[in-house]
Image (cartoon, rainbow, N blue to C red):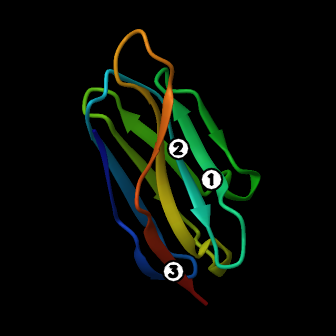
Amino acid sequence: QVRLVESGGGLVQAGGSLRLSCEASGSIFSINVMAWYRQAPGKQRELVASITSGGSTNYQDSVKGRFTISRDNTKNTMSLQMGSLSPEDTAVYYCNIRYKSSAYVKDRDYWGQGTQVTVSS
């Protein structure tokens, strides 16, 4: 069994900052990719940022220069430092991992429960 614990969401004023964290635990052999997605009301879930085990990062264009994703492979943790927040960033943010439960199986995806980020104008 895998567990993802997300933290750090909340209410912030426009222009402010928040830091989201995600900790993975359980039956994990390795994590290939860790990512943050978000889903705003009435919209589809979208990728915000991702980071591979080697440290390669990918960002949605709208957050480039404002958000920074990082991970600690020794602790299976990931963070998203969000700055210059705007009301358009308001959404439920989900932690996602692509992982292996053992060495000889395919990667699987696992999702966290989500954490609400609300940016007031």
62 relative position to 47: left or right: right
Distance between mark 3 and mark 1 Cα atoms = 15 Å
Secondary-structure class at tag 3: strand
Say if 69 sits above or below 41 in the image: above
Q: Is residue 82 visible?
A: no
Q: Nearer the viewer, residue 101 or 91?
A: 101
Please report contact status of discs 2 and 1: CB closer than 8 Å, yes or no.
yes
Is 79 left, or right, of 38 in this rendering?
left
Q: Which mark is residue 35?
A: 2
Dot 1: element = strand
Question: What is the three-letter code of the residue carrying label 1?
Answer: Val
Residue, disc 1: 48
Name which of mark 3 and mark 2 comes first in the sequence.
Answer: 2
Q: Earlier in the sequence, mark 2 or mark 1?
A: 2
Is residue 8 shown above or below 106? below
Specify the label residue 57 is tagged with. none
- Answer with left or right where residue 43 lies relative to residue 107: right
- The three-letter amino acid code for the residue at tag 3 is Thr
Viewer-nearest residue: 6 or 57: 6
- Examine the rendering and report whether any part of residue 100 can be seen: yes
Q: List x then y, in percent, for residue 16.
A: 50, 75
Residue in view at x 63 percent, y 76 percent: 86
Residue 12, given in percent of the width and then of the height, sits at 46, 81
Q: Position of residue 99 (x, y in %)?
A: 44, 28
Query: Whole-percent x and y of residue 47?
Result: 65, 51
Compared with 59, 8 (above or below) is below
Q: Residue at left 73%, top 59%? A: 62
Label 1 environment density (alpha carbons within 10 Å; few <14, some 14–19, many ≥20)? many
The residue at 33%/28% (across/down) is 73
Q: Tags 3 and 2 in contact by the CB under 8 Å rule?
A: no
